[in-house]
């Protein structure tokens, strides 16, 4: 879909966002400001290896974590995980291979399923958030993060923790780090899905709605998610045809589709016959430099 360039923010905290996502909000917004007329860009070197799937995946886990505190009126969904076999025989985990089962869950800022529902920041005691010690002589930096729907946070290549609610209800997290600047933030973000392998979610009664996702973070040293972050997409769906993704250099471009949330977007009508394009996530993608 797209790659946003610029290695470092003004505070020299370099940041990566890996969107293993079904057409995320970030991608849609960028697409409209970068029309295909500015292309072509240099060819990818090495060329992008695309992995194509069609149709739904097979459910392996129906619900990664049932909500511990279900209440009427809550935007409550199961958190399914499955697998799908691509046309080239590659087996993929959908929506994304993740560390949910083994990684620490990040501290809750707002999480209905955990009963953590502050009305505003006056009800949040940040002193109770444990400090992750990365550098003994570092400074304490606080970060606030929310994803539609799931994310994994790495600092300097080290997995700090994961989102406690993969799908819904929507939740947010807070983290406190003792770290020396410059440091590298890397995030794997995933828009979860009801129809595994197809990037679709129930929306206003439509069970074939094309998913849209996003990720927002804000750190106490001034670092915020913005266009200076590098970003890349690794799972793009639902697609009427795999050729709806055009690779220009390292950009997985779908801007000609108009995005997913724009009223004039060309939404796919293929339902269970829709395609997805995946790309291998490089080893060590979360490491500095
Ligand atoms: Ca979440
Ligand atoms: Ca979504």
Image (spheres, rainbow, N blue to C red):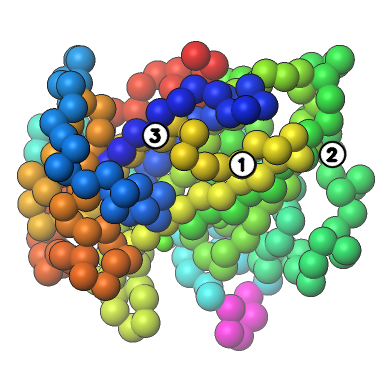
Between 102 and 239, the one nearer to me in the picture: 239
Q: What is the quadrant of the N terminus in the image?
A: top left
Residue behind mark 2? 130
Residue behind mark 1? 224
Q: Is residue 80 left or right of residue 184?
A: left
Disc 1 vs disc 3: Cβ atoms closer than 8 Å?
A: no
Residue at left offset 16%, top offset 65%? 266
Image label count: 3
Q: Is residue 277 left or right of residue 175?
A: left
**Disc with the residue nearer the chain's start (2 vs 3):** 3
Q: Report whether residue 123 is seen.
A: yes
Residue at left offset 68%, top offset 62%? 111
Main secondary structure of the magenta stretch: loop
In x, y percent, where is residue 199?
29, 57
Residue at left offset 64%, top offset 80%? 71
Q: Secondary structure at mark 1?
A: loop
The magenta-colored residue range is 70-74
Label 3 Cα crowd, 10 Å radius (few <14 / some 14-19 / many 20+):
some
Between 76 and 85, the one nearer to me in the picture: 76
């Amino acid at each position: 879909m797209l790659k946003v360039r610029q290695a470092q923010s003004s505070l020299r905290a370099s940041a990566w966002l890996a969107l293993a996502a079904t057409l995320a909000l970030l991608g849609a917004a960028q697409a409209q400001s970068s029309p295909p007329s500015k292309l072509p860009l240099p060819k990818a070197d090495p060329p992008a290896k695309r992995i194509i799937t069609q149709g739904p995946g097979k459910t392996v886990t129906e619900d990664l974590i049932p909500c511990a505190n279900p209440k009427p009126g809550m935007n409550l969904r199961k958190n399914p995980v499955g697998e799908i076999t691509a046309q080239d025989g590659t087996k993929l985990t959908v929506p994304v291979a993740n560390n949910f089962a083994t990684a620490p869950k990040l501290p809750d800022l707002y999480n209905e399923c955990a009963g953590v529902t502050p009305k505003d920041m006056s009800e949040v005691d940040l002193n109770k958030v444990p400090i992750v010690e990365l550098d003994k002589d570092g400074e304490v930096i606080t970060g606030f993060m929310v994803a539609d729907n799931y994310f994994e946070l790495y600092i300097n290549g080290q997995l700090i923790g994961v989102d406690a609610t993969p799908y819904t209800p929507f939740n947010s997290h807070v983290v406190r780090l003792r770290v020396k600047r410059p440091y590298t933030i890397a995030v794997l973000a995933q828009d979860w899905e009801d129809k595994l392998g197809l990037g679709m979610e129930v929306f206003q009664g439509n069970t074939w709605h094309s998913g849209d996702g996003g990720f927002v973070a804000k750190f106490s040293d001034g670092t915020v998610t913005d266009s200076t972050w590098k970003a890349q997409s690794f799972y793009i769906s639902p697609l009427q045809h795999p050729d709806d993704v055009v690779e220009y250099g390292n950009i997985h471009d779908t801007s000609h589709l108009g995005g997913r949330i724009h009223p004039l977007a060309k939404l796919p009508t293929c339902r269970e016959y829709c395609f997805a394009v995946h790309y291998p996530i490089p080893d060590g993608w979360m490491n500095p430099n």
